[in-house]
Every structure is written in C-alpha cells, then in structure tokens.
Image (tube, coloured by chain):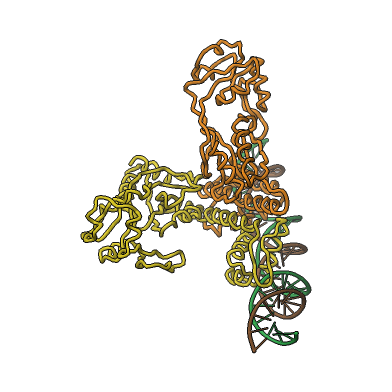
Chain colours: A yellow, B orange, C brown, D green
DNA sequence: TGGATCGATACCCGGGCGGTATCGCCGCCC
DNA sequence: GGGCGGCGATACCGCCCGGGTATCGATCCA
C-alpha cells in the first residue's frame, strides 16, 4: 500500500463523498473512484458501501481509517524529523517541546533552566498548543517531546515520566460568596448560575453552544473571571500567578492533575534524553 | 513521501550497498540510486555519504531509518488489520494473541477461559513467538494483543495492563548440589562451570558462541536440564509444570518478572477490549 | 598502470495515474 | 409519474514517471 492510496482513502472516508474528497485532494473524481476500488480489490475488502445517494464506511473501512491515520502520521513524522535532523547537523540544533498554552509556566521554567545547565544542551523551541493538541504534534513529528496533563490528555502510545501531581482549585472573583470558603466541591462550581464555565474554541475555530462566555486564551480567561463573568477549575500551581481581584479555593473532589513529560517511544535523540533527564531531576 | 521510497531507503540503509539493496528489492541498481538521490533532494538532506568504496549513514539518515521502519510497520499493520477486519465481517471473527512460546501456560489458560466466558467472545488465535518477537508482531499488525514479560520485553509504545508479578527460580537437575539449597544468588548460577546457561537461536537461526548447549524450545531445555547439561532461570510459576528429576530454587536477587497484556494504543476492537477486561479480572 | 568494483549518468520504453466525456442509477419535485 | 439533478462508475486518452540497459568515472588493489 502506498501513502497516496491511504491519503485518498482517508479523504473519502472523512468526507463520505467522492466529489468533495476529490476537490479536497485537488484532483478529479473519476481517478479517485478508481483508486479506491483498486485498493478494495487489492485488500480483498469492501471499505465503503455506496448508493448513489450516500457513502458509508464498512467495518473494515472504519479499521482502515484509524490505522491509515496512524500510518500517515508516522510517515509525516519520518519526513519532519529527518528534515530537522539534517538542519541540526548543518546549523543550529534544537528540540521542539510542545506544551499547553497558558499552563503554569513555573514547572516549565524550572525544566528549561535545568536542561540549559546540562553540558550538551541545545536550543529548546516551545510549541504552544491548544487543549489536547500536543498528542497529535508528537505523533506527526511537529514536536519531539511534550508536557501533558493527566487525566485531560492521554499518554497512549508514548513513553512518559511523571513529573508532578497537584490538586485543583477553582479560580473566582475575590468578592464571590464561594471565595471565602476553605474548600468547595465540583458540583457547587459547575452549577453556579452566576458564573457559568467558559467555552473554548473547537479545532475548527467555532465555539460550542452554552451559557458561558467565550475565551480564547489564558489572559482572556483571567480577565473574564475578574469581571465576574465566569470561573475556572485549574491546578493549584496557577495560584502563584494569580492577579489581584481573583481568589482560589481548593476543589476537594476534583481529580488530581499529573504533569508528565512524554516522547515518541523510539526516540533516540540526545536532546530528548537530556530534557527527560533534567525533568526527572526536578 | 511514498512507502515505496521508504522501502528503498531502508533497504539501502540496511545493506549499505546499492547493488545488494537493489537485488534485495528485485530491481536494477540505477533506478534505486536515482530514487534515493531524488528523496534526498526533496528532503533537502543528505542521507548517505558515498565514496565509491563505502556507503555510510549520515545523522539524518539514521533518523530516517528509525522513523521509516516505524512508518512501514504502521502501514503494514493498516493493511493486515483491514484484511482481518474484512474477514471477520464475512466469516469467522477472531483475534490474534501473541505469547512467548514455552511460557507458563497456566496464566494463559485462565485468561482464555475467562475470556471465553464473556458473552461476545470470539475465537482467539495463538501466535507463539520467539524471545522478544511479540513487540514486532503487535507493531506490524500480525497480532492484535500480546502477553509480554517485563523486564525482558519492552512495552514502549503500547497500552498495557499488568497482570501478575512473580519472583524467579533456577531450574536444576534434582541431584545437583545447589538443588537442596533454600535460595541462591544470580552469580552462583551464572558462574556454574558444570551447568553453563543454554544458547538460544538468534533471529537468523544461528546460535551465539559460548559454552552452553544449544536449545530450540522449552521441551528441549527441560530435557537438557534433566540430563545435567545446563540450568535455567525462570519465573516461579514454571514450578507447577516441572517434570520429575528437576528441582527449582528461588533466586533471591533476580529481578521480579511482571506479565502484562499489551495492545496497540489506538485499538478499538471489541475483542481486544474483551480480552483485556477478562485479563484484569483474573 | 590496468583491472575490478561500485555508484552516477544518459537514454529509452511501457505502464500507471490523472484528465475529460459520458453513462447509469436513484431520489426528488413539479 | 416523468423529467431533472446529483453522484458514483465506466470508457478512453495522453503524458509523466518509474524502471530497464549501456556506459562512464572514481577509487582501490595487484
């Protein structure tokens, strides 16, 4: 199987429409139809059920869609990492660290300092990601190593080392009734009619429906809380950078957040190894 | 990048010789040379350093070799798993479980029994592997799920669930001086001049050099021990199936062996999920 | 210095991939 | 209910690219 065929199949399987898939691939519809049916013949499997009105995935098609995405990610990663390796050999070497935009910068700063102190440290390029984007970055080679936050992110398929576990707090306007409490429960926070939880943009840039205000980044969020429009549950380390006018109260039944450093399992890069070593020594 | 190019590069990188690589690929040498240099041009990276007497990998080439192998495994897995899914849809569904040939069958039997009792259980095809082969089987789709043994196997890149941890024993002829001891240390076993550890075949079928007798499988090994030609360190569960004339003595400083069930991280198969569920309930 | 080895280059050919035109099928709507 | 529109499949065509043979050029060894 060639990656071209996999790309074609993924396009059709995602669009469930040969015409649109062909447009997305920048080609005409007939050769795409042919390529798919040839693929089906070679695999000895029906991947798509077509009527002239609708295209649906078969069981085998669903399997191939999952596996093809993983395979294409691996091929893309091969290409990107090779390019980066070549660049590193003849120029400035570096390593790409993916981290959640707006996450506590304290641990990150300590990590960067500790790594910079290593004898063979190279430049660390930070890749600030939206929520849950880091895994894809690692998988397709845009990043070499990432900081993930359990249980929100999944470490599935990566090698990891746990760095720190912390409880969560709710961040409120200082004047709010709950702000004077010594602790709260999750239910009390999520059901506050006056402070609905904010809405974050999806991958496509649109916001989900709901009562909460729209927030695009960490700074906006803090502003919205200060204005008394929303509240937010966050790891307790975010207390350290809390501006005036905001209060943090422990949420006793919220799951503990574990920060882990993760890297692709076959990574043999000195830089990644160095970062991991520095991280575990923190 | 097309998988064809990756296959070409891996062949050359492994052989470090364009002629031999071309022969292995069943093609002539000139188009192979062209394909590689085209790949290098497109990547903007020198992958191989050639003199007319020797070919060596560059830094970038080494990266691509590792990544390309992983990517090709993923593509192969996509193909195999799709074929199996299609087969399962129109015939007898099944799941392939890779396990070490000659490992303790007791845990395996319990697992198979527990899974068979599940309401939607399908047939489990056993794939008996040589030492350390299971990981490759999982990676390239020849197996759907595997039983691995830490610390000998690595679970890198898979999702896992630990099933059991056990200490190790040394298996000796019953009449041997050590057989009456209540415990021994690793050094005492590995340095026995009268019972050198056996040699296992490599991937290519050849045996490493050494004093020990050659063994091909578990039965042969037990025979060799009974004959007083060798000894062997194994998990204590192997005591259960020990024939007459053999004795087992705990090795106090040998690492504990953990049996884990492992599966590819993006697996969504009902059968794999069922097996894992059954395994964790043991 | 000549031969052997090995990768690169030059040139040619055929198949496969992508394009256009068109068909066949099936809902839908007037 | 028949015409129409949307959609995937088929037919056919042209061209590019991947693979083949012949040969060159460099390097090492005798």
Q: Nearer the viewer, residue B215 or A254?
A: A254
What is the total number of numbered labels drawn onto the structure image? 0
Residue B143 spot, x, y in % from top left: 63, 43
**In-image side of A73 versus A36 (left or right):** left
Q: Is residue D3 left or right of residue B9?
A: right
x and y, in percent, of residue A253 in the image: 35, 49
Expressed as whole percent of the image width and height from the top left, the position of residue C24 reads 77, 75
Figure quadrant of the C terminus of chain B: top right
Residue B151 image offset from top left, x and y in percent: 51, 33
Occupied quadrant, residue B98: top right
In this orientation, which residue lies closer to the viewer: B118 or A13? B118
Residue A186, image quadrant: bottom left
Left or right? Give the position of A72 relative to A106.
right
Q: Residue at x 31, y 51 (%)?
A: A251
Look at the image and tell me in which quarter the N terminus of chain B lies: bottom right
Instruction: Look at the picture and state if B40 lies above or below B108.
Output: below
Q: Is residue B65 left or right of residue B95?
A: left
Answer whether residue B54 is visible to the viewer in this image.
Answer: no
Q: Nearer the viewer, residue B87 or A3?
A: B87
Q: Is residue B132 or residue A255 the one in the foreground? A: A255
Residue B114 seen by the camera:
yes
């Amino acid at each position: 199987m060639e990656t071209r065929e996999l790309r074609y199949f993924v396009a059709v399987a995602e669009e469930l429409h040969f015409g649109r898939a062909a447009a997305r691939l920048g080609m005409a519809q007939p050769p795409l139809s042919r390529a798919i049916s040839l693929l089906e013949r070679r695999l000895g499997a029906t991947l798509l059920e077509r009527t002239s009105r609708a295209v649906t995935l078969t069981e085998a098609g669903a399997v191939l869609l999952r596996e093809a995405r993983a395979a294409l990610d691996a091929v893309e990663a091969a290409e990107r990492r090779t390019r980066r390796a070549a660049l590193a050999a003849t120029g400035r070497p570096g390593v790409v660290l993916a981290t959640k935009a707006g996450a506590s910068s304290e641990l990150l700063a300590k990590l960067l300092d500790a790594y910079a102190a290593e004898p063979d440290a190279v430049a660390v390029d930070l890749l600030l990601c939206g929520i849950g984007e880091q895994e894809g970055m690692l998988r397709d080679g845009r990043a070499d190593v990432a900081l993930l936050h359990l249980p929100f992110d999944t470490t599935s398929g990566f090698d990891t080392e746990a760095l720190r576990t912390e409880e969560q707090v709710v961040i409120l306007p200082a004047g709010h009734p709950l702000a004077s409490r010594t602790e709260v429960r999750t239910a009390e926070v999520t059901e506050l009619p006056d402070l609905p939880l904010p809405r974050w943009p999806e991958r496509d840039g649109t916001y989900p429906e709901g009562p909460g205000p729209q927030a695009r980044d960490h700074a906006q969020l803090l502003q919205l809380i200060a204005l008394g429009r929303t509240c937010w549950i966050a790891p307790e380390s975010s207390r350290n950078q809390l501006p005036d006018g905001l209060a943090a109260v422990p949420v006793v039944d919220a799951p503990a957040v574990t920060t882990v450093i993760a890297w692709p399992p076959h990574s043999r890069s000195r830089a990644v190894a160095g970062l991991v070593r520095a991280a575990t020594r923190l």
